Amino acid sequence: MVTRGEGAIEAIAEKVEAGERLSFADGVELFERATLLELSAMADCVRWRLHPEPVVTYVIGRNINYTNICWVQCSFCAFYRVPGSTEGYLLPKEEIFQKIQELIELGGTEILLQGGLNPGLKIDYYEDLLASIKARFPVHLHALSTVEVRYISDSSKISLKDTLKRLKAAGLDSIPGAGAELLVDEVRERVSPLKESASDWLNLMQIAHELGIPSTATMMYGVGETLAQRIEHLIRIRELQDRTGGFTAFIPWSYQPNGDALRGRGGSGYGYLRTVAVSRIMLDNVQHIQASWLTMGPKIGQLSLQYGVNDFGSTVLEENVVRTAVTAQLMPLEEIRRNIADAGFVPKRRNSRYQLLE
């Protein structure tokens, strides 16, 4: 048996090359001791085993933040406005329709629809909005974080399962992984004490998957957690994926200070590359790892293609939550394709279920 320390990274690399699952202790060892080059080699090994073609995908999509009114007041969020604020808004349906029409004219296929926990909205609002969009546009609705769905359930006094069934019937196609942050309650209680617990987040995702509603999974790191807690997060995602197979992709990103109450320090490109590589290595049952170029910038996004990433995410025609931060960086479609090609890969457009469209 190889003890932790000298020789341990080589032994872990051999397990990765053989396609063996890594343990919690292996993950911590990688974070603490592996060099960046060692992590790149291991993550690249997993990436090519899962995706043997030199293709990096992307989707043409648009983010629409239908409301910024929210009472949860997460310490890392500068986007929300409390109920009653003069800066709070709820987009009229016609404005939402106009945004979607602009996406359709550009050949777009996906809408990421998210907002805050607005006390004035019940399930009938969401059913009407989703159904109205579906009646007008051939788009995939990647909509409503787990915390939004749970709040709709609570405020409408119906079960989570029935809430998800009704939202699916109205047009919900998949659920974004937002709200996961770190699936460690000690961290969640410190940075977002009014949000659901880690087990609640996982439970709602399991119900959604069992109803045939796929989702992505995310991790926001850099909020004072330990490296072991990042691995705990990855293990919990992996365990749920073993049970349901419902996660289509994993997207890690670093907390970015943006005038929020947390007032933490932003993550570095070096730290992001280490984290995304470890994520690819540990999540052997999640097919796709998506670049977080929106927060880390196009060049780090491009570099991450050598650290296990195989998808460049959405064109993001609009982003308000992250754009509240000074770190937000948007890219036109041509630049996304160029960044992928310059890294030595073939850019290919996909739909929200990762089916190639070209």
Image: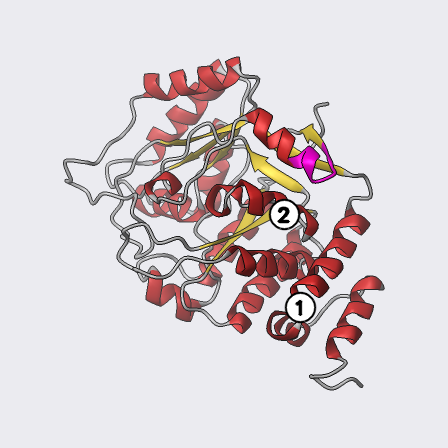
**Disc on the earlier residue, 2 or 1:** 1
Residue segment shown in magenta: 340-346
Q: 240 or 180: nearer the eye?
A: 180
The kind of residue tagged 1 is Thr
Answer few, some or many: residues within 10 Å of disc 1's Cα (few below 14, many 20 plus, some between 14 and 19): few
Image coordinates of residue 264 in percent, x first then y, are 34, 61
Q: Is residue 166 above or below residue 242?
A: above
Image coordinates of residue 138 in percent, x first then y, are 55, 18
Q: Is residue 111 above or below residue 50?
A: above
Please count the marks in the image: 2
Image coordinates of residue 207 in percent, x first then y, are 54, 49
Task: Determine whether, in the image, residue 177 is placed left or right of residue 279.
Answer: left
Image quadrant containing the C terminus:
top right
Residue placed at 59% from the left, 62% from the top?
234
Residue pointed to by mark 2: 303
The kind of residue tagged 2 is Leu
Alpha carbon separation for disc pair 2 and 1: 16 Å
Image coordinates of residue 286 in percent, x first then y, are 68, 51
**Label annotation for residue 35:** 1
Disc 1 element:
loop
Q: Is residue 46 above or below residue 24?
A: above
**Label annotation for residue 128:** none
Label 2–label 1 contact, CB within 8 A: no
Q: Quadrant of residue 342?
A: top right
Image quadrant containing the N terminus:
bottom right
Disc 2 element:
helix
